[in-house]
Image (cartoon, grey):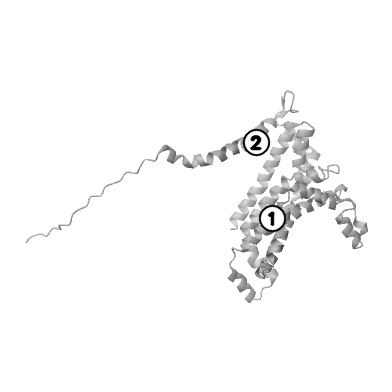
Amino acid sequence: MTTLRSTAPTTSRRTVAPKKKSFLHRWSGWLFVLPALLFYGVFVLKPLVTAVEYSFYDWNGITVATFVGFENYVRVLTDPQLLASIGHAFFLIIFFTVLPVSGGLLMAALLRELRSKGMGTFARTALFLPQIIPGAAAAIAWVWMFSASGTANQMLSAIGLDGLTRAWLGDFTWSLPAVGVIGTWINLGFCTILLLSGTGKIDASIYEAARLDGAGFVRTLLSVTLPGLKQEIGVCVTVTVISALASFDIIFMSTQGGPGYSTMVPGVQVYQLGFTQSQVGLASALALILTALILIVVLPLQRLFRSED
């Protein structure tokens, strides 16, 4: 009995060794990033390290600095005036974040309805205009409108509310809310456009199903639009909270922290301490504490919106 053997040629498997990457190929990605890293290191990291160093000294910017340890930080956390400026920044979150985000959500829902009818282009342009105007220029315009003979008081007088007229930015009680209105006007357009763009990713069939089920505008807003815009709302909240806590240009150009200290915020306080009062160490400590507060507020917000995604 003969055994049949296959005459098919056998192929031997050869292990091909991977080619060794060249030095340039291995580090090419870092070479592209290197210019940005250099700028970041020179203009962000180095000033941050320098501010940390200055915060431990009593220095007027000219003479020899004196090491004082944590004295500047203790003063920031115990001085009523400095603490009040931090409190004002947190109060501005109502006007810089809460009102623009909630108003932007409502406007985005309305503009979505107008867009379906071909009427939303002008409205989107008008709402976004404040965002492209520099904050300093916007503050100057609102200073005129909030003056004793400005547009705000003229409108109140026109409807018979002369008793409510006042120099809004010169009033100790109403100056901070008046400044907050400027922030609301600027941030509303940004939030509206961002949220409106987010509505484009929501499936139109969901809106159609809600309409067929008899859902009105408010129910559709709460049940369809709001859940579908969690990521965009997270971005709006993060950006506007930072703009409130780190606000400078609007306050500086409109009130410079006055009258008295009724509108003083940390950004303006740091400028005055460092460049007007020559307390560089104290200004650096306040700036670092403000940075830490922003991180303490923003990082949990990021985690919150990420966990709800």
From the viewer's perspective, tell me whether residue 26 is left or right of residue 45.
Answer: left
Q: Quadrant of residue 82?
A: top right
Q: Give residue 190's mark.
A: 1
As displayed, is residue 29 above or below residue 240? above
Q: Residue 36's x, y, as percent?
A: 57, 40
Decide: few, some or many residues near mark 1? Use Cα within 10 Å; few <14, some 14-19, many ≥20. many
Residue name at image x 58 percent, y 71 percent: 205
Most distant residue in the top direction: 64
Q: Which residue is mark 2?
A: 48
Closest to the observer: 118 or 196?
A: 118
- How far is mark 2 from mark 1, CA to CA? 29 Å
SS of the residue under disc 1: helix
Q: Position of residue 207 (x, y in %)?
A: 62, 70
Determine if residue 102 is in view. no
**Residue at (62% x, 54% y) in the render:** 304
The answer to the question of whether label 2 and label 1 lie on touching residues, with beta carbons closer than 8 A, is: no
The amino acid sitting under disc 1 is Phe
Q: Is residue 270 above or below residue 164?
A: above
Which callout, 2 or 1, points at the residue further toward the start of the chain? 2
Label 2 secondary element: helix
What is the number of callouts on the image? 2
Q: Quadrant of the N terminus?
A: bottom left
Q: Is residue 150 left or right of residue 278?
A: right
Badge 2: how crowded within 10 Å, few (<14), some, or many (20+)?
Answer: some
Identify which amino acid the numbered label 2 is placed on.
Leu
Any part of residue 79 in sight: yes
Quadrant of the snapshot with the C terminus: bottom right
